Image: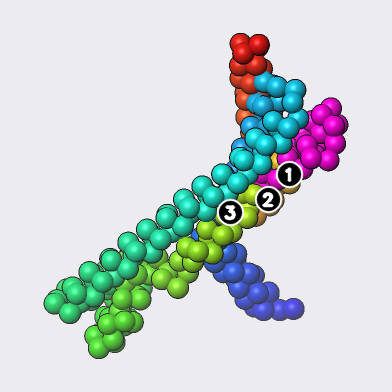
Amino acid sequence: MSESAGADRAAAERRQQAIGVESGAARAAVLGINDGLVTNTALILGVVGATDVIGVVQLTGLASLVAGACSMAAGEYVSMRAQVELLERLLEDERRAMIAAPERERAVIRGALEKHGFDPVITEQATRGLANNIDRALDVYSRVVLGVNPDELGSPRAAALTSAIAFATGALIPLVPWYLAPRPVALGASLALAGLAALGIGGALGHLSNHRVIRSALRQLLVVALASAITFLVGRLLGVIAS
């Protein structure tokens, strides 16, 4: 494979990765599974610290899974819907401005292009070519002035669904053993699965961001361990007080 072909392939892969990272669904998936894992692992350990009744652990963990998934989905939907509506409003305002003062608005686009390093002569020709095509001018305005690609905003519904599924997946990992084994075995299995999942999530994030994989994995494990330790101690304290 020639250097040119290799460079083109690498550039295409980077563009696809960037699209995935920027889309709301991908962001929701990463945040969702991590939040589900940390939240339910910590909550389960908190309940374990307060009571020996396995049914309470099961019910609390399941309630946390359902409530967290619904909360994440609602939050992601509202957030992305607000982003889309804000961009739509900005572009509608710009459409009216282009109709009222086209030369001024083309000057704004021209200035933004020049700041990106484009030759002034080329930018002048390009902006003149937008004079009779407001939709195209709005697309260029969105990209070079607002810094947003209107074609890659993602779907609020898809992001909400992905967020709910991801959170539920993460929350299910430390919960499953409590439905399959007695308390001592369930506790050990829950901790082991949560630790392995934390290492996997951290390692994957480190790989995707070109950071140190092992360091990222251990950092994620530490986050889960600290959250779990704190809630366990609080649960133990509350259990002692209640008794």
Question: What residue occupies the far left of the structure in this picture?
Answer: 100
Pointer 2 or 3: first along the chain: 3
Which amino acid, by three-letter code, is at mark 1? Answer: Ile
* Marks 2 and 3, how far apart at CA: 9 Å
Along the line of sight, the residue nearer the viewer: 18 or 108: 18
- Mark 3: which secondary structure? helix
- Asked if the residue at tag 1 contacts the one at tag 3, i.e. Cβ–Cβ closer than 8 Å, the answer is no
Pointer 3 or 1: first along the chain: 3
On the image, the x and y values in percent for residue 61 come to 67, 38
Disc sitting over residue 169 in the figure: 2
Screen quadrant of the C terminus:
top right
Q: Quadrant of residue 29?
A: bottom right
Q: Is residue 58 visible?
A: yes
On the image, the x and y values in percent for residue 50 come to 67, 20
Q: How is the image coloured?
A: rainbow
Which residue is disc 3 drawn over? 164
For this view, does 80 lie left or right of residue 11? left
Query: Secondary structure of the magenta portion, mostly?
Result: helix
> Magenta span covers which residues?
170-197
Query: Crowdedness of circle 3 by 10 Å Cα count: few (<14), some, many (20+)?
Result: many
Query: Crowdedness of circle 1 by 10 Å Cα count: few (<14), some, many (20+)?
Result: many
Which residue is disc 1 drawn over? 173
On the image, the x and y values in percent for residue 114 come to 31, 70
- Asked if the residue at tag 2 contacts the one at tag 1, i.e. Cβ–Cβ closer than 8 Å, the answer is yes
Whether residue 85 appears in magenta in the rendering, the answer is: no
Whether residue 195 appears in magenta in the rendering, the answer is: yes
Along the line of sight, the residue nearer the viewer: 13 or 97: 97
